[in-house]
Amino acid sequence: MDFSAPVNAFVAGFPDFIAQLGASIALFIVSLTIYVLMTPHKELALIRAGNPSAALAFGGVVVGLAIPLGACLAHSFGLIDLTIWAVVTLLLQLLAFRFADIFLRGLPRRIAEGDVAAAIYLMSVKIALALIIAGAVSDPNVMLFRSG
């Protein structure tokens, strides 16, 4: 059995894989950092103190940022395309998260006080928004705009 074709394809594609993975991880870390700086309550400090509601809320952020980024990776055709769409989707997520945090009055205080129900609700909103944004990126009509 000849394995040269798959090995050659792997060798040819590996540098692009590393570049896209590195760019995605960098964008993910930057987005998480921006979110942490945007939140009125200090989720990481609350998590370190053992607050489960802060951990749930922050977990929603982590998953919520990763979902659209994964969709960008799946549908991009190069590093520049990936970066543009990832920045757009991550900014939308950060704005949506901020809006959800502001819209649900008293939520930061409730999370800081350990209200798990509030954290689960917020986590659900964040993941739902991520799925909607990821769906918009993966819509076939978006692909038409990219090629035109």
Image (cartoon, rainbow, N blue to C red):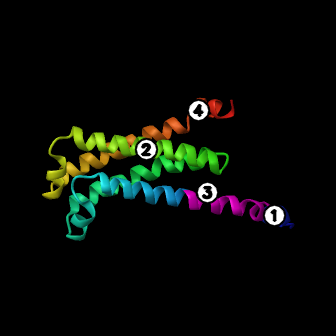
* Label 4 secondary element: helix
Residue 140 placement (x, y as % from top left) = 60, 32
- Name the residue beneath numbered marker 4: 142
Alpha carbon separation for disc pair 1 and 2: 37 Å
Magenta region, main secondary structure: helix
Q: Earlier in the sequence, mark 3 or mark 1?
A: 1
- Name the residue beneath numbered marker 3: 20
Residue 50: image quadrant is bottom left
- The residue at 19%/51% (across/down) is 108
Mark 3 vs mark 2: in front: 2
Q: Identify residue type, mark 3.
A: Gln
Q: Earlier in the sequence, mark 1 or mark 2?
A: 1
**Which segment did they paint magenta?**
8-23
- Name the residue beneath numbered marker 2: 91
- The residue at 70%/63% (across/down) is 14
Mark 4 vs mark 2: in front: 2
Mark 3 vs mark 1: in front: 3
Alpha carbon separation for disc pair 4 and 2: 18 Å
* Label 3 secondary element: helix
Decide: few, some or many residues near mark 4? Use Cα within 10 Å; few <14, some 14-19, many ≥20. few
Alpha carbon separation for disc pair 3 and 1: 19 Å
Alpha carbon separation for disc pair 3 and 4: 20 Å
- Name the residue beneath numbered marker 1: 8
- Work out which quarter of the rendered image holds the N terminus and state it: bottom right
